[in-house]
Image: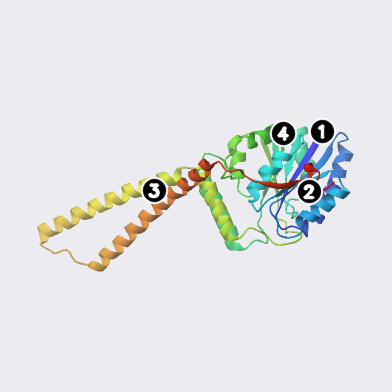
Amino acid sequence: MLLTVVVPAFNEQEAIPIFYKEITKEAEVLKNSRKDLDIEIVFVDDGSKDDSLNVIKSLRKEDRRVRFVSFSRNFGKESALFAGLEHARGDLIVTMDADLQDPPSLLPEMLGAILDEGYDSAATRRVTRKGEPPIRSFFARCFYRIINKMSNTEIVDGARDYRIMTKKMADSILSMKEYNRFTKGIYGWIGFRTKWLEYENIERVAGESKWSFWKLFKYAIDGIVGFSTAPLSIATYFGIFMAFVAFLLIVFIIVKKLVFGDPTSGWSSLVCILLMLSGIQMFCIGIVGQYLSKTYLETKRRPIYIAKLTSDEGEDE
């Protein structure tokens, strides 16, 4: 039985050697408990600008279990995960980060969930966000509440990309060729029986997080647009509500004029109302624009990633 470890890496030259040391140590533990288990490690270099690729190549020369895919530019973590699953040869596949925020020590329990308990997947979630900026943690919690109310697809709060799955489940993910990818939603959408393991947040072993607040915000928008049409309904309800309010105001002004003879006055309040209505209109148009832009990108049918080099090509031999 072959276990493939898929590791997306973007500017992780400091973390990769530490990760390799820890994962190979854990591989020996797994090998002792399950004699028929072999392991391979597939690094996906997501267009790193540092020396990450050369570090991976050095590991490849020392250990033929190490394989890699190197992108022509930075395509993002979602594309890196997709590429890793495509190049995985294993009967079981585990995806995890190179910064060791996903503890390898959980692998025996995750593996047991599939081999001994009959699950299709074992996934992890953080129960704390210790070490994160409070504002980031607050918005993350809000995002999970919002998307689970809007979407029929369950997305677990604190879910990590650290999970192990069967080849059949991985093939189901690969069958979804959408360009705008939100893997946490895809996991929930395809189903399969999943065991969840909880752990407390762990600090990075080296380097800095590549996820800025703005990138996380855009990622959240991708998730909402990709797995819910509720925002379109909200825009419709806004329009109906404001049209109803406008009708009541028109009736009120007419009645006031006929009964009390008051002339219509108050240009400043009129400007405020116009600005508010204009803002609501732009907000609703923006929602429609998000869905339209995603549709536009999907219809282009561009590749999810472009590989510049892979270890299978033999260029590092």
Chain-order first, disc 2 or disc 1? 1
Residue designated by label 3: 235
Residue designated by label 2: 104
Q: Secondary structure at mark 2?
A: helix
Chain-order first, disc 2 or disc 3? 2
Q: Secondary structure at mark 4?
A: helix
For badge 2, the amino acid type reads: Pro
In what quadrant of the picture does the N terminus appear?
Answer: top right
Residue 242, horizontal then vertical, whole percent: 31, 52
Residue 1 shows which numbered tag? Answer: 1
Camera-side mark, 2 or 1: 1
At a point 79% along the width and 55% down the height, the residue shown is 54
Residue 230, horizontal then vertical, whole percent: 45, 44
Q: Badge 1: few (under 14), some or many (20 or more) residues near its Cα, within 10 Å? A: few
The image quadrant that residue 116 belongs to is top right
Position of 171 with respect to 273 (left or right) is: right
Chain-order first, disc 3 or disc 4? 4
Residue 186, horizontal then vertical, whole percent: 60, 40
Q: Secondary structure at mark 1?
A: loop
At a point 28% along the width and 65% down the height, the residue shown is 271
Chain-order first, disc 4 or disc 1? 1
Position of 135 with respect to 10 (left or right) is: left
For badge 1, the amino acid type reads: Met
Position of 77 with respect to 252 (left or right) is: right
Real-space CA distance between mark 1 and mark 3, rounded to the nearest whole angstrom: 51 Å
Chain-order first, disc 2 or disc 4? 2
